[in-house]
Image (tube, coloured by chain):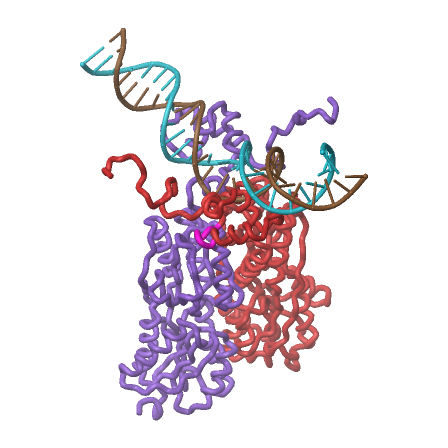
Chain colours: A red, B purple, C cyan, D brown
Amino acid sequence: MTATDGTPARGRPRGRRRTQNASMADVAKAAGVSSQTVSRVSNGFPGVNEETRGRVLDAMKELGYRPNSAARALKRGDFRTIGVITFTLSTTGNVRTLEAIATSAAHEGYAVTLLPVAVPTQDEVRGAFSRLGELAVDAVVVIMEVHLLDAASLTLPPHVKVVVADSDAGDRYAVVDTDQAGGTRDAVRHLLGLGHRTVWHLAGPEGSYAAQRRTDAWRAALKEAGRGAPPLVRGDWTAESGYRAGLRLAEQPDCTAVFAANDQMALGLLRALHERGRRVPQDVSVIGFDDIPEAGSFQPPLTTVHQDFAEVGRRCVQSALRQVRCGEAERGTTLVPTRLVVRESTARAPRGRGVS
Amino acid sequence: MTATDGTPARGRPRGRRRTQNASMADVAKAAGVSSQTVSRVSNGFPGVNEETRGRVLDAMKELGYRPNSAARALKRGDFRTIGVITFTLSTTGNVRTLEAIATSAAHEGYAVTLLPVAVPTQDEVRGAFSRLGELAVDAVVVIMEVHLLDAASLTLPPHVKVVVADSDAGDRYAVVDTDQAGGTRDAVRHLLGLGHRTVWHLAGPEGSYAAQRRTDAWRAALKEAGRGAPPLVRGDWTAESGYRAGLRLAEQPDCTAVFAANDQMALGLLRALHERGRRVPQDVSVIGFDDIPEAGSFQPPLTTVHQDFAEVGRRCVQSALRQVRCGEAERGTTLVPTRLVVRESTARAPRGRGVS
DNA sequence: GGCTGTTATGTTTACGTAAACATTCGGTGG
DNA sequence: CCACCGAATGTTTACGTAAACATAACAGCC
C-alpha cells in the first residue's frame, strides 16, 4: 500500500502508455483467442467460426479497437496513400483535379496526402520530393502548370511512382493532360465559323505549359484556316490581368474575336470591353477556357471550352495505382477530351469588318 | 549448383523483398557500425564521433537510404499527419482554408491527408470518421458549412483530436470561425451609412451555419439601426442562384441595397440587375462576402467583406497541434476578424427613394 | 483403423525504428 | 592504483500487425 511499492497500481493494464488504443493482443485476450484470429477477423479472412468471429467483434467494439495503420503499413510494405504535389490551390483547375484525385483514390481505398509547395523554384520542388521521400506515400501526382520537372531538378526515390497532371514531363513520367490543342482548335474554329476574319489570343503566363500549348494550338488553327495571327496579348491567368489586356484590345478596331486562355482572364476582359463601350457579343466575341462554375453567370454568359477535371483526376489515380501494383513506372501521355460550351459571349462577326 | 539447392541465389541480399529501400541495418552494415548509431545519425542526436557520422552519412547516400515512416510512426506512436474532412472543394472558402492548413501544417513538420466526403449525409460523415480512425492521423480538421456534427452522428476514436472550421460544434470541439457577425455588421452599416433606408439580404442555403450566422447578423444589424428587415431571399451559394434571386429583386422598386451572403451569388445578382436595367451602384448597391480573387473584376468591381482564410487555416493547425501535444481536447470558439473592402458596387442611395 | 483432407485455431517470426540498457575505453581524482 | 566518470558505440527489446508455419480435431474413405 505504500507509494514506494514498485508494483504498478491496479486499473491501467501494465505497459499501455498514456491512453492509447487497444491493440490486437488486448482484443485477443478479451475474446479469449489468439491475436492471429483477431487479425483474421479484422481483415475479413475466411476460416473463422461464426461464433468465434462474433466474440471477437464484440471484444473489438467493447475496447474500441482500431487497427494501427502504421503497423499495417510496416508489415505490408505500402501505405495506401497517394501524395499530391501542387504549387497552389488558387487555380480552379488544380483544385478540381485535386478533388477528383482524392475522390477516386478514396474509392480505391487510398488516402491522399497534400504537399503544397509555396514558391515554384526548382529548389522548392526538390524539397517537396525529398520530404515526400520520407512521407508515407506509394505514389505521387504532380499538378503543375509550370514546367520544372526537367532532369536536373529531381532525383526521386527509386520506387515512388509518379504521374504528372496538366503538364509535360519530357517522357520521363506518365502524364495525364487535358487535350489543350483540341479544345483550342474547337474554340478558334467556332469563332472563324461565325465569320470572324481572325481570332486574337489572350495568353496565359510564359513558363506555363498549359498556356504554351493553347498558344501554339491557336497559331496552328489560324494557320490551318489560312488566317494570319494577330499580335499575342499576354496575361497571368488572373482576372485583373485580363482586364488590363482588355483595355488594350478595346483599342484595336479590327479585334472582333478573342480567345482567352482561361475563364478568369475572360472575366476581366469582359469588364474592360464593357467599360470601353465595346459590346459583347455584338462588337466583340469572347471565348474562354475551363468552364468554371461561374462562367454561365458572367455578363454575358461565357462561351468556353469545358475541361473534364474529374476525368483527369480519375486517370491520374488509375495510372498511379497501376504503377504501384505492377511495380514499374509508366511513361506516355493520356489526353482527356474537352467540350465546347456555347453560351452568349460569341456571335456572328459584325458586318463590314468581320470578313475581309 | 542444382536448382533445387536450397541456398538463396547470390546477388540480392537475402530477405530484401522486391526492390525495396535500404533499411537502417543495411546502412549499418555498409558503414561498419550498429544500426543504433545509424539511428542516432539519422535523427541528429549528439554523442556520435564526427568521423563515424561521416561514414554513416556516406553509406546512407550510397544506398539511397530513406527512413521508413511507417516504422517511425509505429515506434513513436504518432503520425505527424493531420486529416482534413471536407464535403466539397467547390467553394472558395474551403479551398483557401485547406491550402492554409496544408501550408501551416507543413511548416510544423506535419503532412495533411485529405478526406473528401461526397454527399453530406450523416452516414457519410460517420463513414469518413471511421475511415479516418484507421488512417494515420493524429488530429482532424473538419471543414463543413453544414451542421452535421451533432452528438448522434459521430463517435470519434477517443484520442483523435478535432478542430471544426467555419461551423458550429455545440461546444463539443474546438472551433475556428470567421467573424461572420462582425463582417455582416460592417456590410450592413456601410450600406446604411450611404443613406439606404434598409438592406435586402440574399442568403445562403438553409442548413449552412455560415449562412445562418450571416442572416442572423443582418437582422440584428438592421434592428440595431431601427430599420425593418425586408423579406429574405434565399440562394444556394452558386452564381446561378444569385441570378435567379436577382431577377426577383429587380422587380422590387424599393430595393436599393443588397447584401449577398457570398461573392458568387453577388456575381449572378449583378448580371440579373444589369439585364433588368437596374444600374449598379447608381440604382442598387450590392455587397458580397468572401472577397474572392475575381471580385475586383466584376462589373462593377464588387464591394465585399474580406475573409482571412489563411488565418483560419493557421489557427486550425495551431489548435490541432496544441491538442496533440498536450494530449487533451480543446473546446471553445476562436473568431478571425474580417475586413470590409469597398470597391465600386456600392454608392449613396438614389435620391427620392433611399431615405424615408 | 490408419491415411488423407478440411476446418478452426495457435505459435513464431519479421517488418524498420528507437528507447532503454549494456559495454568499452581513455582519462581523473582520491 | 583503483573506483569512477563521461563519451562513443553496441545489444536487446518492443511497437502492432500479418505471413508462414504449426497443431488439433474431426470427417470421409478404402
Question: x, y percentage for residue B20?
Answer: 59, 37
Question: x, y percentage for residue D16?
Answer: 47, 44
The residue positioned 38% from the left and 84% from the top of the image is: B200
Question: x, y percentage for residue B97?
Answer: 43, 61
Q: Nearer the viewer, residue A253 or A82?
A: A82
The residue positioned 41% from the left and 53% from the top of the image is: B160
Work out whether A250 lies above or below A307.
below
Range of the magenta residues?
Answer: A61-66
Work out whether A275 lies above or below B127.
below
Q: Is residue A106 left or right of residue A171?
A: left
Q: Is residue B224 left or right of residue A157?
A: left
Question: x, y percentage for residue B140?
Answer: 42, 56
Membership of A322 in magenta stretch:
no
Work out whether A91 lies above or below B272.
above
Q: Nearer the viewer, residue B209 or B302?
A: B209
Membership of A62 in magenta stretch:
yes
Is residue A294 visible in the rendered image? The answer is yes
Q: Quadrant of residue A261?
A: bottom right
* The C terminus of chain B sits in image quarter: bottom left
